[in-house]
Amino acid sequence: MTAALLLGAAACGGDDGDGGGSGSGGGTTVKIGFMGDLTGPNANIVIPPFQGASLAIDEYNAKNPETKIELVKYDSKGDADTAKNLAQQAVQNDKVVGLIGPAFSGESTTAHPIFEEAEIPTVSPSATRIDLASQGWKYWHRVVANDGVQGPAAAKFLEQAAGSVKKVFVAEEGDDYSTGLSKAIQDQLKADGFEVAVDRIDAQASDYSSTVNKVRTFGPGAMFHAGYYSAAAKLLKQLRDSGITVPWMSGDGSLDNALATQAGQQQAEGAYVSCPCLFATASDEPEVQTFTNNYKQKFNQDPAVYSTEGYDAATVFIKALEAGKTTPKDINDYLTTLTFKGISKEIKFAETGDISANLIYIYQIKSGKLTLLGDANTAKAN
């Protein structure tokens, strides 16, 4: 089943980053979806890539009066079953020609097979689970390095942070993303001779005293939380309040300043976060600075986690349209040949749909804000 290009009068578009971006006036309109947690517990790491995508599409529409893009929102709230239902809606009712997302790995697992059957290309700005690239999917892509890259890099940094105590405690939340990242980190730590203890937590729980006691008993030199900032902040606060001060780190699911505000500035101070993404505000490249200024002007806030990846994922589809590719299959075929310098990195897809660029960055919370320490090869624990 292949979705056809939707033709018709262009819808009126807004400039609020709220799913408009379709411009005004005559001509044709193509629908591109965005799927992710836009109002759920981890929305802070999905709204930025959605806004980045909105900015790219608004810029495109301003320069292309004949063929417009309408960005259609699909708010999954991070729920895999909801994402599956929304995928059906996007394919059967809305006839999208492509989709930016799904944002998370779990919802990618349930939703993408529907897009795959419909032969509709997807480009995720943030789903990092390793085995998403080993499903044999032909219409799936992502503009971010996977956890098979992030895990070993984070593990190496944890080893440095742990110092002479060759023990690391890993907390995981049990979802696809968390367990995948957790395993990648554990495998590297064990290969390097570290003792690892693992505890699975309930992300919805409020009391993590059992995990805190296990950490105290194990006596690690460092800790890693594989999961999202909403649970990570609760656990980090309880660890610090109980007097456990060992170096603590999380992955890209926690790369939001809400980690500090929810855990408490004092409790979060010094915490590390790894991410296969570069905050635009940390770059001095002219193109990135222009993106940052335009983003801030449009949304009255700085770009955040995966803002640049959202912009680049949208640009993938924009490049295809500019090349005259307007059907899902033609767009997908074009992506196999596409190479361009994006805002976040060079955008080039491997045959599996993975991105070719594999840089991992390390951030640290200082005075309540995430600051860049450098890439994982050069960043130093302190």
Image (cartoon, helix red, strand yellow):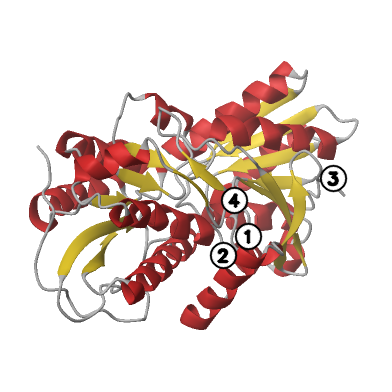
Upstream in sequence: badge 2 or badge 1: 1
Please report whichever mark, 2 or 4, sits nearer to the chain's N-terminal start. 4
Name the N-terminal-most of marks 4 and 3.
4
Residue 279 shows which numbered tag? 1
Residue 304 is labelled as: 2
- Say what amino acid the circle numbered 2 marks: Ala
Q: Mark 3 points at which residue?
A: 380
Position of the N terminus, as image quadrant, is top left
In space, the residues marked 2 and 1 are separated at their CA atoms by 6 Å
CA distance for labels 1 and 4: 7 Å
Q: In this view of the protein, which residue sits in the foreground, 29 or 70?
A: 29
Residue tagged 4: 277
At horizontal 64% and vertical 35% (from top left) the residue drawn is: 170
Residue 250 location (% of width, % of height): 64, 46
Q: Earlier in the sequence, mark 3 or mark 1?
A: 1
- Name the residue type under label 1: Phe
Residue 301, how many percent across, how many down? 55, 78
**Which of the pair 59/234 is nearer the observer?**
59
Horizontal side of 73 relative to 131 (left or right) equals left
Q: Mark 3 or 1, which is nearer the eye?
A: 1
In the rendered structure, the answer to whether residue 295 lies left or right of residue 101 reads right
Find residue 347 and report its horizontal and vertical position in percent: 50, 45
Residue at mark 4 to residue at mark 3: CA–CA distance? 18 Å
Outermost residue on the right side: it is 164
Under mark 3, the amino acid is Lys
